[in-house]
Amino acid sequence: MSSASPKLHNAMWPGLVGKGDEEGQEPPISLEHMLDLTAAADVNGQKFEGIDYFLFLPHTNPEASDDELRGIADMIAGKGFDVGSLVAPVWPGTVGDSAMGDDEARGKFLSAVKMACRVAGIFNEHGVRKYGVIRIDSAEFGVEKWREDAKANTSRIADTFREAAKIAADHGERLAAEGEICWAGMHSWKDMLDLLEEVGMPETLGFQADMAHTYLYLMGYNAPEHALLHDGYTDDEFYAAYEKMVDKLRPWTIDFHIAQNDGQVHGAGSHDKTGKHCPADDPNGKLDIVKCASYWLKDATARGIQHICWDGCMFPNAMLEDPKTWNTILDSMIKVRDAHGWN
């Protein structure tokens, strides 16, 4: 019998991240259209079961009224979806600011977490959301400033994260920090682990593992001293390194993104120099998605994971509009669940 869990979710933020009205950017894709694209996907009768959701404009005003948010919940449920994990708008230019910044900046960061917890509460009460976390990162783009005093700056981020975790706990929520090479203090597997351990609140603040971003952890982009692989590696070397990295981060992992990566560092607009997400069947993809997912999903239920989500940031709009894109992604996720899921 096929597995019923983890539930299969699609992310809404590929319609926003890297999009805009600057030169070279494509326009954002609306929330409703992203929902419709997701709802149209079908692989032998299996559909996406939910969405993960970025709490910022133009998809959502994080300061929207309770009634407006209930209306969004009605729309999502009406498309046949549950809501899982939410992305707090912690970055400069949204609600928040750097977790490594001055007191004013850190106050903005915490305000963004409070807003996300409020929205989560409304969705939970509505019934459209039954599981999932709230995603954060350090919101300090790039690592040069962090390197000026790595120890003190990591401690400052950890202090902000502890305060954010207290807010989340008061709302019955958990926070997941997404490891990505562009975020200071989170830019390598070792620095990410050091930060999680310094926060020291595993019951409330854990790790969000994205398969594309963590691949670049192995290669030591932005932290060559922590590289576990080098160009020209063999399959045996890859899986030995992958197991070493995941064994360190998996105990903290409470949210998991299925993704593909071609080994390039890529970005667009304000979201630059990060891991390049690729189509699930990209011929240049470095990852055996099903096999690599097994390392992260071991003992997943013990860590409260109830769903997995596809992440494909910065796909061209033409690719996002192509039904084949979503059927191929859904097929990959079904294969992950068939191999590693549970009932």
Image (cartoon, rainbow, N blue to C red):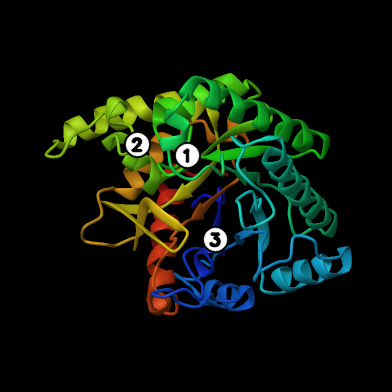
In the image, taking residue 126 as reference, residue 233 lies left or right, namely left
Q: Nearer the viewer, residue 87 or 22?
A: 22
Q: CA distance from mark 2 to mark 3?
A: 22 Å
Q: Position of residue 301 (x, y in %)?
A: 58, 35
Q: Position of residue 59 (x, y in %)?
A: 65, 69
Q: Position of residue 342 (x, y in %)?
A: 53, 42
**Disc 3 marks which amino acid?**
Ala
In the image, taking residue 106 as reference, residue 20 lies left or right, namely left
Tell me the element at label 2.
helix
- Crowding around mark 1 (Cα neighbors within 10 Å: few <14, some 14 to 19, many 20+) is many
In the image, residue 202 sits, relative to residue 99, either above or below, namely: above
Tell me the element at label 1.
loop
Residues under numbered marks 2 and 1 in contact, where contact means CB atoms less than 8 Å apart: yes
Q: Which mark is residue 179?
A: 1
Say which residue label 3 marks. 11
- Crowding around mark 3 (Cα neighbors within 10 Å: few <14, some 14 to 19, many 20+) is many
Q: Position of residue 97 (x, y in %)?
A: 64, 46
Residue under the image location 46 percent in, 35 percent down: 145
State the image quarter where residue 327 is shown: bottom left
The label nearer to you, 2 versus 3, is 2
Say which residue label 2 marks. 217
In the image, taking residue 267 as reference, residue 117 lies left or right, namely right
**Disc 2 marks which amino acid?**
Tyr
Tell me the element at label 3.
strand
Q: Nearer the viewer, residue 111 or 217?
A: 111
**Disc 1 marks which amino acid?**
Gly
- Crowding around mark 2 (Cα neighbors within 10 Å: few <14, some 14 to 19, many 20+) is many
Q: CA distance from mark 2 to mark 1?
A: 9 Å
